[in-house]
Amino acid sequence: MPTSPAIAVCLPPPNTMTSNDNKPITDGGTSAANGPPKRIRARYQRGPPATGADVAPVSPVGCCAMNASYDDFQSASVHFEVDNSADGSPALRTGWLMLAAGGAWWCALHPEVAHLAVVSSVFWIVRPFPRQAFRSNLLACLLITFVLGVISGQSRIAHAAAGDVVNMSFIGSVRVVDDPQPYGASTRLIIEVDGDRCELWARRHSVRARLESVSAGQYVTVSGEIVPLAEDRYLRVRWQHVVCEFQAEWLGDLTDGSAMSRASNRVRQLVTDAGNVIGGERGALFRGLVIGDDRDQPVEMLQRFRSGGLSHLTAVSGQNVALILGVATPLIRKLAPRAQVVSTLLIIGWFVLITRSEPSILRAGLMAAIAAVASSRGRRVEPVRVLSIAVIGLMMVDPLLAASVGFHLSVGATFGVISIGPLVTSIIPLPKMISVPIGVTLGAQVGVLIPALAVFQRAPLVALPANLLAVPVAGIVMMVGLPVAIVASLFPPLAHIMLPPIELGVWWVDIVARLAQRIEPASPVPGIVASLVVSVIVIGVAVSRQITRLRAKHEG
């Protein structure tokens, strides 16, 4: 489950103002009473780049707290740059940007020209800027039309590749795209043959045993026949760019891939070795929590985590990106400001690589990268805007991601956490220590309600207590699991000292899943009804507050 966004706080230099400097200025200008003018607010937000001030590391959302500028030194007010850009020009409306993300998603799923024309026309009717900003409105409409056209064109090209496949024999070396995945008595492997991705199903024991040593990025010599996929099968696997099936006769020599793939495979092997020390189902769950390797997780484990609303813990998710950056924060903050941004981007790219570029990781990685760059420039971007920009960017690069269930759940959960979570938190009459976790969890559950019902036909009733009990401990395992696994594997004598606390955390997460499965009703009806009731309450509160806000604005 995604966590709420972190905030990087840029502290100003120590307070050197005199008592006279702190007095409000009633004739205008910068003061504790009215703050700086808009035209210089961006300069305040960026902070002093060369004064030696302690600048906190880049984080997914940036803002600047200017303690001594506007208030007493002990208190802090935060000024966000949301409605205007640094030069005072109007910014894109958040609602319009969200609509653009939805339009990009629709054009990726429906690349026909008719759909493109209808969706594009919507953005020529709905203005992204105030009415008087004619030139800005025109440029934004032209830009979104171009973006939608690119997405539709990319999607049509990707779909056309499946129609060009013909039956043919092949002998040669192919690149392994993803790690082998066991499915019952078979093993599935995705390979790239002359630029086309094929799925290879190994059903014979000898071939399956041969695939146990294969990893993504390697090259293997194969002999067999390429055949087109059935239409229903293609629709299920298109998000992986698979367009054909390779019916293998034999598998030959295995060679290593690029230096980058060898490095990522080495890290994954170290985590696997640490998981083997833990052993059993807990070792498999540990690998899933840390790097998303769920190959050895038994069906029973997957089922109980799904029944308790904890399926997001069995594989890597966007939460891992935030936690990995959290671990690296003490080192990043010792660097220069530009080095902080570069280091953050490198860490994100490295983690995306070792987790096999899962859709949820791509979404979280791009969001973190956007926020890191914005924060380095002293700007604060609303999380919903970051999510919308990330969705549009990913749709432009890979429109087939729109067909991924994992991507649907990841975007839905993130939207729920950053938009619905604060709303739920505000209406819960409890201390923040209790209301915030409840709000975040309920927000995520509401955000994934539609795709969860469409795919799994259920919404777990026990998801709230199960997540409140399991996610904090799972987060600790995700945060320290990767560095601990690397150190324990490189220095085996330390494994028996460092891994037991990690194993205890994994055991707790598994125990919560087992209890949740026992408590969860057999019928999906109670969970669905409860989720719908929560959704109706949240929508009602949101609409009521919006009406109140518009009424106050009209009266004012």
Image: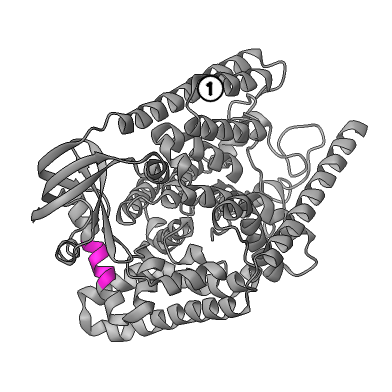
Residue range (magenta): 266-272
Q: How many marks?
A: 1
Q: Which residue appears at 36% of the width and 27% of the height? A: 157
Mark 1 surroundings within 10 Å by alpha-carbon count, few (fewer than 14), some (14 through 19), many (20 or more): many
In this image, 438 relative to 371: left or right? right
Quarter of the image for residue 265 reads bottom left
Which residue is at the front of the view, 411 or 479?
411
Characterize the magenta stretch by its predominant secondary structure.
helix
Q: Quadrant of the C terminus?
A: top right
In this image, 499 relative to 42: left or right? left
In this image, 245 relative to 361: left or right? left
Residue 151 image point, x, y percent: 45, 28
Q: Is residue 269 magenta?
A: yes
Q: Which residue appears at 62% of the width and 66% of the height? A: 460
Q: Is residue 184 magenta?
A: no
Which residue is at the front of the view, 255 or 307?
307
Above-or-below relation of 304 to 259? below
Above-or-below relation of 168 to 274? above
Q: Amino acid at mark 1?
A: Leu
Which residue is at the front of the view, 440 or 118?
118
- Residue corresponding to mark 1: 116
Q: Which residue appears at 37% of the width and 47% of the height? A: 345
